[in-house]
Image (tube, rainbow, N blue to C red):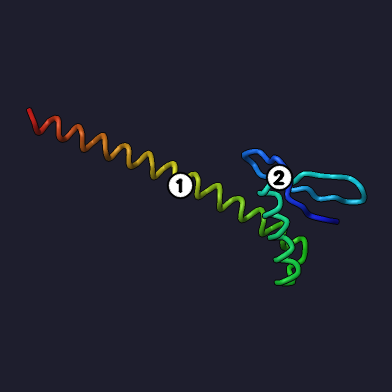
Amino acid sequence: MSLAPSRGSTAKSKSHIEVSGEERRYSDEELLLLRRVRCLHQDLGINLEGIEIIARLTARVEALQRELAQYQKMVGQTQEEKMRDNALHTDE
């Protein structure tokens, strides 16, 4: 198996991995996942079942963080609207 950066990559960088004469392209996100799996397994001794649980929990935490950011944005917009309304009523 060999890993070499692709030529003429687009906005999403791809890398080439050659396996037994076949060429496959992996996204940066996929390569990051593979590196995490390798680190968890080799460096920390976590088995594949544990890695799967960690991956699912990590994905869930990231989804919850995105959802929280959306709620925080909505609350911020609502507070700005209230401040504008208060300012309009104060000027009357």
Tell me where residue 46 sits by quadrant.
bottom right
Of residues 85 and 19, the one drawn nearer to the viewer in this rendering: 19
Amino acid at dot 1: Leu
**CB contact under 8 Å: marks 1 and 2:** no
Amino acid at dot 2: Lys
Q: Which residue is mark 2?
A: 14
Of residues 16 and 34, the one drawn nearer to the viewer in this rendering: 16
Distance between the Cα atoms at labels 1 and 2? 31 Å
Residue at disc 1, secondary structure = helix
Residue at x 73%, y 50% (from the top left corner): 5
Residue 61's x, y, as percent? 56, 53
Residue at x 64%, y 41% (from the top left corner): 12
The C terminus, quarter of image: top left
Residue 56, label in figure: none
Residue at disc 2, secondary structure = strand
Residue 47's x, y, as percent? 77, 66
Judge from the rendering whether residue 11 lies leftward or rightward of residue 80; answer left or right.
Answer: right
The tag earlier along the polypeptide, 1 or 2, is 2
